[in-house]
Amino acid sequence: MATYVPFLSIEDEDDLVVSFGLGAQAQTSLTLLRSPQLEFALHEEDRGVSVGGESENGERELLKAITWGRNTVEILSTIRRYALNVSAVDPIEIQEAKRVLRKMNFDNSFEVKDV
């Protein structure tokens, strides 16, 4: 069952951020974050889009694929899969999120699908 997303937050400055508000009142969020200007300091295997914060075991969770459906988004990370219901999100916000995700994927570190 997909988690309800009432809105997205998007930043396109030094850090590239797409954050999905989760639940009816968006009590929590699932955030995709990439800081291209800082990645040179990371080992190559640690570069890419972070999903959320660190996992319970301290491992960095990285984005592997994102699939956009008509009303859903599936996010596959190095640790888990997320299913999100974005039917209530403004289509302009969705287009803006896709634009920022394209910028995040400058090195083709993850797969993007529109279905």
Image (cartoon, grey):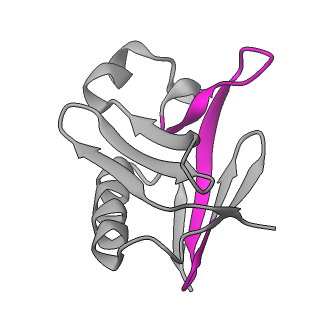
Q: Nearer the viewer, residue 63 or 74?
A: 74
Quarter residue 83 falls in: bottom right
Give yes or no for residue 90 being in the magenta stretch.
Answer: no
Camera-side residue of 67 and 64: 67
Image position, residue 64 (x, y; %): 62, 51
Q: Nearer the viewer, residue 111 or 44?
A: 111
The image shows residue 53, relative to residue 105, as above or below, that is above
Examine the rendering and report whether any part of residue 104 can be seen. Answer: yes
Quarter containing the N terminus: bottom right
Viewer-closest of 27 and 83: 27
On whether residue 54 falls in the magenta region, the answer is yes
For residue 54, side relative to residue 48 (left or right):
right
Q: Is residue 74 above or below residue 40?
A: below
Decide whether the magenta segment is chiefly helix, strand or loop. Answer: strand
Q: Position of residue 50 (x, y in %)?
A: 53, 34
Q: Residue at x 71, y 20 (%)?
A: 59
Residue in the picture at 78% in, 20% down: 56
Q: Residue at x 57, y 81 (%)?
A: 69
Residue 111 pos. (x, y %): 55, 62
Instruction: Give the quadrant of the C terminus.
Output: bottom right
Q: Is residue 106 visible?
A: no
Q: What range of the chain is rendered magenta?
A: 48-73
Position of residue 70 in the picture relative to residue 2 (left or right): left
Q: Residue furthest front?
A: 25
Does residue 34 sit above or below 115 in this rendering? above
Residue drawn 32% across and 66% down? Answer: 93
**Image quadrant where residue 72 sits:** bottom right
